[in-house]
Image (cartoon, helix red, strand yellow):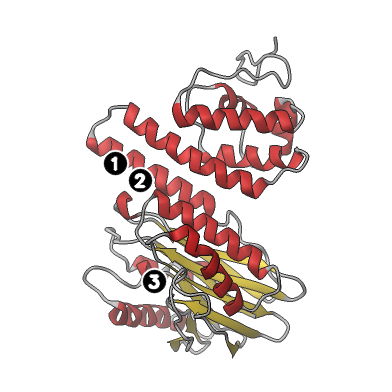
Amino acid sequence: MVSDDGGREVGRAGQLRKPGLVGAHQELNTALHRLHLLAGRPSLAEIAQALKGAGISRSTIHDAFCSQRLPKWKVIDALVEVLSSQAPGGRPEEDQKVLYEVWLRAAEESDEQHNQGPQTARERKAETHELLQRALLPQEIPQINGLELASRYLPASDPARAGGDWFDVIPLEGTKVALAAGDVMGGSILSIALMGQLRSELNALVHLGLPPHKALNLLSEQAQRLLGDRLATCVCAVYDTETRLLDISSAGHIPPFLLKRDGTGLILDVPTGLPIGLAAEACETVTAQMSPGETLFFLTDGVIVSPTEGLDPGLARLTTSLAKAQAATDPMLPSLEDLIDVPLEALSNLRHDDAVLLAARFS
């Protein structure tokens, strides 16, 4: 018998013992052990080495396999990525989709079993929703020559409304990059799960080299079997850093906001289209020429719409706040990391909806 970093017995390398679990937690644990077996039963040390730099200790890995406590999604996500990639015929993205849905059910069952007071249960639900939402958003924004990028995600104050807003930055072949933002209506754990599927499918479609409108039309066709009676919106753009041309299309989503070098701003003139899942041929692509020093903001309606403020007042507030922030540093451009926080600082602490903001400054 050997011990982990904390002195606990873990058995021989690769012989991790299953805990006595029930329900979705047992299903999750069984799937994790199965992936471990398919990957050739790597030892804790080997797994920890593969996860070096991810902030996950050897004892945390052991607990994910052997503890009665439900692991954090960050740990499961990392383990699935490593083990599935080592298994013959492994499909990390597909395995992650399946396991996060099981993990969600396990988290809900855990909440019910703890018999906590209403406020504590509410806080735990909010934490679970936010944890999963953040796990399914890009963990790091890739570095793109010719672009400076920054992003923010703020969850809704009410956990019953949290989830479903997303963004993505997708490097493509040559000098192109895809930028996207979307929203699955009706915040809930199901919205978060659907968001993850839509984001993954759009990623695959733009990698085929499709123009934005064709990618969104195909996504809409595929989503008809996923969304049921729910609605989703999305805006997708492909930018060529060499020509500075931006091809952009919208499926019922708020078009991006363009902040010019002189501090003036406007919403890009993009046909709105129909939300995802309603029609398969409802989107079209328009092309715009970007200039150095301009900043494009992809956003969800939580940034500009509230129960007491509609779209037009919200857009006016966005324009005014960003123009002032840019003028304050004239003739230099403000830091993009500072600039992206400006419209979010004006939001109420009681946020009616999730808020996603992706900023792309052209150089």
Q: Position of residue 277 (x, y in %)?
A: 46, 68
Number of other residues with Cα within 10 Å of mark 2, as a class: few under 14, some 14 to 19, many 20 or more: many
Q: Residue at x 54, y 32 (%)?
A: 28
- Residues tagged 2 and 1 counted as in contact (Cβ below 8 A): yes
The answer to which quarter of the image holds residue 50 is top right
At 53% across and 86% down in the image, what residue appears? 331
- Measured in 3D between alpha carbons, the distance from the residue under mark 2 to the one under mark 3, in whole angstroms, is 23 Å
Q: Amino acid at mark 3?
A: Pro
* Quarter of the image with the N terminus in it: top right
Nearest the viewer among 31 and 48 is 31
Q: Is residue 352 left or right of residue 5?
A: left
Give SS at disc 1.
helix
Between 137 and 221, the one nearer to me in the picture:
221
Position of residue 343 in the picture relative to residue 19 (left or right): left
- The amino acid pointed to by label 2 is Ala
The CA span between labels 2 and 1 is 6 Å
Residue 158: x and y in percent read: 29, 52
Q: Which residue is mark 2?
A: 126
User: Which quadrant would residue 239 be assigned to in this image?
Assistant: bottom right
Mark 1–mark 3 CB contact (< 8 Å)? no
Q: Amino acid at mark 1?
A: Arg
Q: Residue at image x 23%, y 32%?
A: 117
- Which residue is label 3 attached to? 343
Report x, y in % for residue 157.
30, 54
The quadrant of the rendering that contains the C terminus is bottom right
Which residue is under mark 1? 122
